[in-house]
Image: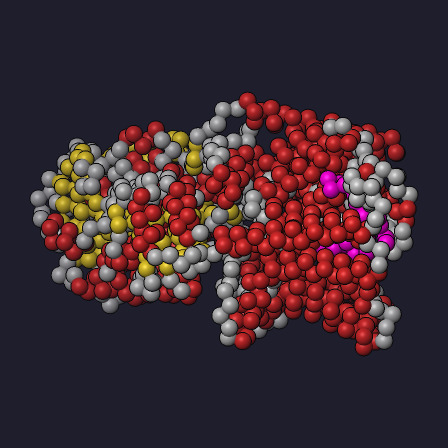
Amino acid sequence: MTERRANARPVARNTAQSATRPATRRAAPQGRGGVHHAAPERRYAILKWALLAALAVYTVLVVGANSARDVDFSVIRSAIAAAPGVSELKTLDENGFQERMDATPAGCEDWLMVGSDDIMDVSELMIAKADEATLDGLEAAVQKRLEAQLAVFRSYGVNQKDLLEGATLLRRGNYLFYAVGEHADQWEDAFLACIR
Amino acid sequence: MVFSSLHFLYIFLPMVMLAHRFAPRRLRNGVLLVASIWFYAWGEPVYVGLMLFSVAWNYLTGLQLGAAARHSRRRAVLAGAVVVNLAVLGFFKYYGFLVQTLNGALGLRLPDYQLPLPIGISFYTFQALSYVIDVYRGTTKPQGSLVDFATYITMFPQLVAGPIVKYTDIEAQLRKRGATLAQVGQGLERVILGLSKKVLLANNLGLLADAMRASPKLSVLSAWLGAAAYALQIYFDFSGYSDMAIGMGRMLGFTFAENFDYPYRARSVTEFWRRWHISLSSWFRDYVYIPLGGNRVGAGRHMLNLLVVWLLTGLWHGASWNFVLWGLYYALLLILEKYLTGGALSKLPAGAARALTLLLVTVGWVIFSNTDFAAMGRYLGCLVGIGSQGFADRAFMYALRSNALLLAFAALCCGPGLRQWQLKLTGRLPLLAVVLFAALLVACTAYLVHGSYNPFLYFRF
Amino acid sequence: MKKKRLLFLRATAIMVLALVALLDVAFLIHRDRATSPLENRNLQQRPAMTLQGLLSGRFESRFDSYVSDQFPLRDHWIALKSTLDRLAGRTESNGVFLGRDGYLIQDFKAPSEADYRRTMDALVDFLDRHDDLAQYVLVAPTAVTVLSDALPALADAGDEVGYIHRLAEDLSETPATFIDLRPAFAEAKASTQLYYRTDHHWTSDGARLAYLELARAASLPGDTDGFERRLLSNRFQGTLSAVSGFRMNQSEDLWAYIPGDGTPQTVVTWVSENRRSASLYREESLDTRDKYAVFLGGNFPQIRIETTVNNGRALLILKDSYANCLIPFLTTGYQKLVVVDPRYFTGDLEVLMEAEGVNEVLILYNAETLAEDTALRGDIE
C-alpha cells in the first residue's frame, strides 16, 4: 500500500503549474516569423477543415466496406464459379441444402451452396441473400452444422477438424457468407469484392 | 494485440522495451509512437486511420487554442473540437445503437451499418478531450511537437483499456524520462501481478461465471455463485489490465495514476466509485460534474448533476440500454446515500457496510453483464428465488467444490493484505521473491500456451 | 530493507530478461512442427503475408496462433497447465470428468426437447414402416452411468439414465425390441473393465457383454467361445485425454476378440472405398494414435459383411462407433451384415434395404451419440 501511494503524483487541477516549461517547447507556429497571431491560428483552422474532409472520405469508405452493395446475385455466382477450388465441388439443390443445414433456404431472395460428395471432404460454401430474420435463422443453422461436423470429425480427422474450426461466417448487409475449406479465404475475398 | 498473449509478452514487448531503452533520447518518443501505432494496427488495421485523425485534430486544436487570443474565439474552437471528438465517438460506437432505438421506437427504417467498434476509441477520445479542455482552461500549454502529442494519445500501455491518463500527469515525462534497472524491475513486478490476475484468476472465474449463466436450470445459490464469479472476474480482468498498463508505463519511465484501490473493500457505493476505475470517475468529475456545478448547488440541481454524469458513465461503457440502466442504478444509489441513508450507513460496523455494498455492486454487475433485458430479468429473478430451480442444487455444489480454492484466493486478493505481504517479502527475502515471481510468470505462460478462454471484457470500449 | 528491495527489483528485471531471451532464442532456432500428436490437431504454420490478409486481420490472428502453436516446449507448458488445474481442484474440462481409478468420463448432454422429438418421431416412423422386419434397438449406456461411482465427488453429470429410460418408453409401442444393458453392466462392472479409461468407447469385453444380451433377444449363438481374446496394444491413448487435457501421458491396454478357427469365414467389403478384405480388423491403425480404428478400420458410410453362415438372415445395422467392436460377434449368427453409419451415408436407405434384401434391423448407438445425433433421423425420415 505504501509503495503505491508513493508513486501517485499529486495532480494539480486548474492551476497553471506547468509554468516551468523549458523554452524549447513551442506553442508558437513552426517556421514562421510568428508576429501576427491570427495567421497561424488561421493556418491551424484550415488544416483542421482539411482533416474534417479527410475524415468524411474515410468514414464513407469504412461504412462502404462494411455494408454490402445490392448486386445481382448472378454476379456473385459467377465470381464464385471462377474462384479456385469451386469446380471440384458439387452445386447443391434445395434438398442438398436442407440435408446439410437442417434448414430450408426457401425464405431467401437468392442463395447458392456448393459442397463435396466425398464424405471425408468438409469443404463447403454457402452464400444467402435474405432479410435479417431469415439470415438470423440461417446463421443459427450454420452454427449447428459446424457443431455437428466438429462432433463427427473431432476424434477422426485432424485436418477436417482444423478446417472446420477455421470456418468463416460473415454477415454483410443482407448477405450471409459461410465457408469451410482450404480455399475459404479466396472465396471470402471473391465474395467481398462483389459486394464492396 | 492483446496484453495477455504470447506474441505480445515475448515478442512485441521485449523488442519495444529494448528499442526504447537503447534509442537516443531524442528518438524515444518516436520509437514509442511507432510501436504504439503498430500495436494498434495489429488489432485494427483499418481503424488506425481514425485514431490518427484524432491525434491530428486534437493536436491542431491545442495549437489553435494557444494561438487564439479572444475568449469567444477560444470558446468556439473548444466547442467545435469537442463536438467533432464526440461526433466521431458517437458515430463509430453508438450509431447502431441509436438507429436501432429510433427504428424500434418510431418505426423508421434508417440504415443500420454494422460497423465494428474501433478498439480503445472511448479511451483515446477521452484522453484527447482532457487535453483540449485543459489547454482551453490554461491548465497546460499546448504541446508543440506532433510526435510527442501523438505519443501521449497512442501510447500502447493505456491505449486499449486505460487508465485514462491526463496529459498534465505525464507531460513532463514526455519530455524527459528514464528508467533504472530497479524501476524496470518495479514495472515488471506490476506487470506480472497484473498478468496473473488476468490469466490465473479472471479467466478461470470467467469459466465459472459462464457455466452458471449458460445453465438452463439455475438454483438460487447457483445464480449467486455466478454473479459473484462475474463480479470477481471483471475486477481482476480490468484491474489486472490496469496493473499491466501501469507496470509497462513504469518500464518506459512514465508514472500513471492508480486506477483501482481495492474497490470491494468499500463501505458505501460512494466510496466504491472512489476506488473503481478511478481515472474514469475522475474524468467525469473534472470535465462534466464540476462544470455542471457539482455539489455546490441546491439539492435538486445536485441530483440532476449526478443523474447526468451517471447516465453518461453508463453509456460510456457500452452502446446498449442495459448500460444506461446500470448508470441509472448507481445514480439512484448515490443520491440515496447522499440524501437519505448516508448517515445510517456510516454508523454500521465496517463488515456489514462492506457486505451491503458488495451486494449492491454484485447486483449492479448482473445488470451490466446482460444486454438482453429478458435474460437480465430472469437472472435477477433467480437471485431472489423467482423462476429458479430450488435453492441449492448439485450443479452449485459441484461448481463450488471445483472452484473453492480459486474463489478463496480471489477473495483474499480483493484486500490489500496479500499485496502488503508480497512487498514485505521482497524486502526481507528478495531472492525467494524473485523465484515466486518467476513461478507466477511460468504459470501464466503455461495457461497462455494452453490458449484457454481469454476474452478481455473491457474491449468493448 | 531498502537495499534488499532494490536487489529484488533488479533481480526480477534480470530474471524476466533471461527467461524472455531464452524462449525467444529457442523460438528463433526451432523448426515448425506440423502436428501435435498430444493435442491431436494440426499446428498453425507461419502464415503468408498478403495485403488482403493484413487488412482483414486474418494474418494478424494467424500469426498470434502461430506463436502459441510453435512456442518452445509447448507440450510441457500444456502439461503444466493441466497439473495446475488439478491442483486448483478442477475435475472437469471440456465436458470430460477426471474420475477415480484413472478413469476419464465424458459428460452426457441431454438433447433439447425439439431435437429429441425429431429423432424419436423419425425412429418410430421408420420402425412402424418396416414392421415386417425383426427390429432391435440397443442404446448403450456410457461410463457416466455405469461407472458413476468413479465420478468426482458431487459431480453434476447429465441424466443419461433418464434419457435411456425415456427412449425405452417411447419405443415400447413400436415392434422393436429394446435391449436394456444397464442391469447386466451393473452386475459385471466389478469384475470386468467395461469402458476404456482414456476413451469414450466401451472395451471389447463390454461389447461382448452387450452382444450376449442382444443374442438372447435375437436368437443368436449365446456364446463367444470361438473367439480368442487377444491384447492388440498396451499403448492405447484414447480421445478423452486430448479433449480434456487430463492424464495426457496415460495409456492402457486394448483387447480384442479375434475370430478363431471355429468361427465362420467373412468377406468384408467397404463399399464406397471399393476395398475388400477377409479380416474385420485393420492392423495399421495400431501404429497410429487412433488405435480404436483397428475395429473395421473406423467409420465408413457402408460396409457389407458376408459370412459362410447359411441361414438367410440379413441384418441392417444403423450404428455409431460403439458397434465396431461388437460386429465381429454378429458374424456367427448372420449370413449378411449391412453396416451403415448415418453420419457418412448419403444414399437412399430404403433402396439399400431392398437391394441387399435385409430382413432384420439393429439400431446400435451409445446414448451420448444418439442424444446429439442429427444424421440418423435424416437418413430414416
Q: Look at the magenta stretch and give its main secondary structure.
A: helix
Q: Is residue B420 left or right of residue A165?
A: right
Q: x%, y% of residue B86?
A: 68, 59
Is residue C168 visible in the rendered image? The answer is: no
Quarter of the picture containing the C terminus of chain B is: bottom right
Write down the region rendered in magenta.
Answer: B126-148
Q: Residue furthest top?
A: C29
Whether B66 is drawn above or below A156: the answer is below
Above or below, comparing residue B33 to residue C381 in the picture: above
Say if the magenta span includes residue B130: yes
- Give the tally of numbered discs: 0
At which x and y percent is residue C209?
A: 29, 47
For the point 65% across and 50% down, the residue is: A51
Q: Please indicate whether residue B196 sits to the left or right of residue A188 in the image.
A: right
Colour approach in the figure = secondary structure
The answer, for residue C19, to whether it is visible in the render is yes
Was residue B24 drawn as part of the magenta stretch in this picture?
A: no
**Residue at image x 51%, y 60%?**
B113
Left or right of B138, for residue B383: left
Q: Residue at x 73, y 28 (%)?
A: B23
How far across and how far down the image is residue C63, in percent? 52, 36
> Quadrant of the image for the N terminus of chain B?
top right
